[in-house]
Amino acid sequence: MAIQFDDWQDLKVAYEVARLGTLTAAAESLGVHHSTVLRRINNLEASLNTRLFHRHARGYSVTESGAKLFATAKLINSELERLHNDIIAADSALRGSLLLTTVSGFMDILSGVCEQFQNLHPQVQLEVILDQNRLRLDHGQAHIAVRAGPRPDEGDYIAQHLAQLSSGFYVAKSYVAKYGLPKTLQQLEQHSFVSGVAGYNGKVPYFAWVDAHIATTQVKLRVSETSEATRAIVKGLGIGGIQHDIAAQYTNLVPVMASELSWPTDLWLVTHHLVHRTAKVQAFSQLLKAYFKNHPHKTTENF
């Protein structure tokens, strides 16, 4: 039966350990955590059902099976480096398509950067893929990802910190006029909520908080996209979480218990090392980093 790799990143990480001799050196070279390297080695050995390394106090040395595998991995790595150089040479001009992936809720923040990029580089067709699922940059599904949450740790990805965004509960003034504004956690029990589809938006902190602390009967609407949840909150359907930057764009929203309920989230610019230095990826990345450097992000204090 043919052997299939569950994840080619496992091979890349294991090759770095074979090349450098220790988990620590490989982790530093790849820019990931020590535990990520160990996990990927274990995954690869499990998928191949063979031991690739001898573990000893001084580090890791390859077994006979490992030596055969990593000889092939060395050839693959050389071919990828050659491909990298070819891509750079072919993409020295700003033209063609640039694929950006993020979740729908971020478009309210990124739209200004997208407009600026299009004005500066009209020969590039900017395509934004809105998907809650993380597209594979190493498979060419996108050139740039804007991700929220913990630092991405995929071996061949380059992650740059953009900002720390903050979110809180908001409600429309029309809702307050009908049902009042809750001032305590106990008073939240008397109100309706807008949240995410159960199990679909588990990584969105304010959706997760609602699932953990609010009775199911109080959640009057669940949606699968944060942007649509914002629309529902603006329309007065209930209380719900919104990023402060986005909430600031609506004059009819009121913060709810801002000092008690707030969720910080780190935002990352993620690229794959094979296309990281291409002209169009660099052009968009520089605009994006400049935007977050020059635009202070809203909190409830300056809302």
Image (cartoon, rainbow, N blue to C red):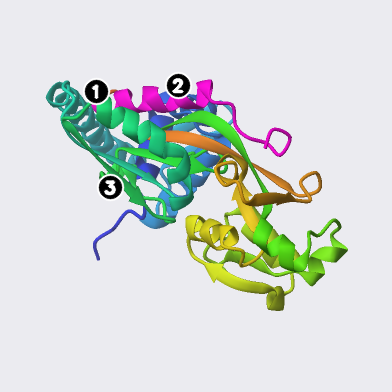
Query: Which residue does the image show at 52% across and 22% down from the upper left?
Result: 293
Instruction: Find out whether the residues at labels 3 and 1 contact each other: C-beta distance under 8 Å.
Output: no
Query: Which residue does the image show at 32% across and 45% down from the upper left?
Result: 128
Which residue type does callout 1 highlight?
A: Ala
Give me the C-alpha separation between circle 2 and circle 3.
25 Å
One can see residue 58 in this view: yes
Q: Residues within 10 Å of mark 3 (few under 14, many from 20)?
A: some
Q: Earlier in the sequence, mark 2 or mark 3?
A: 3
Give me the C-alpha separation between circle 3 and circle 1.
18 Å
Is residue 97 one of those drawn in magenta?
no
**Residue 76 found in image quarter:** top left
Q: Position of residue 280 (x, y in %)?
A: 25, 27
Residue farthest toward the bottom in the current orientation of the protein: 217
Q: Position of residue 282 (x, y in %)?
A: 31, 24
* Residues in magenta, as a range: 279-303
Could you say whether the residue bearing mark 1 is in a helix, strand or loop? helix
Query: Which residue does the image show at 33% across and 33% down from the upper left?
Result: 115
Task: Single out the mark in the foreground, 3 or 1.
Answer: 1
Q: Is residue 210 above or below residue 273?
A: below
Q: Which residue is mark 2?
A: 290
Q: Residues within 10 Å of mark 2 (few under 14, many from 20)?
A: few
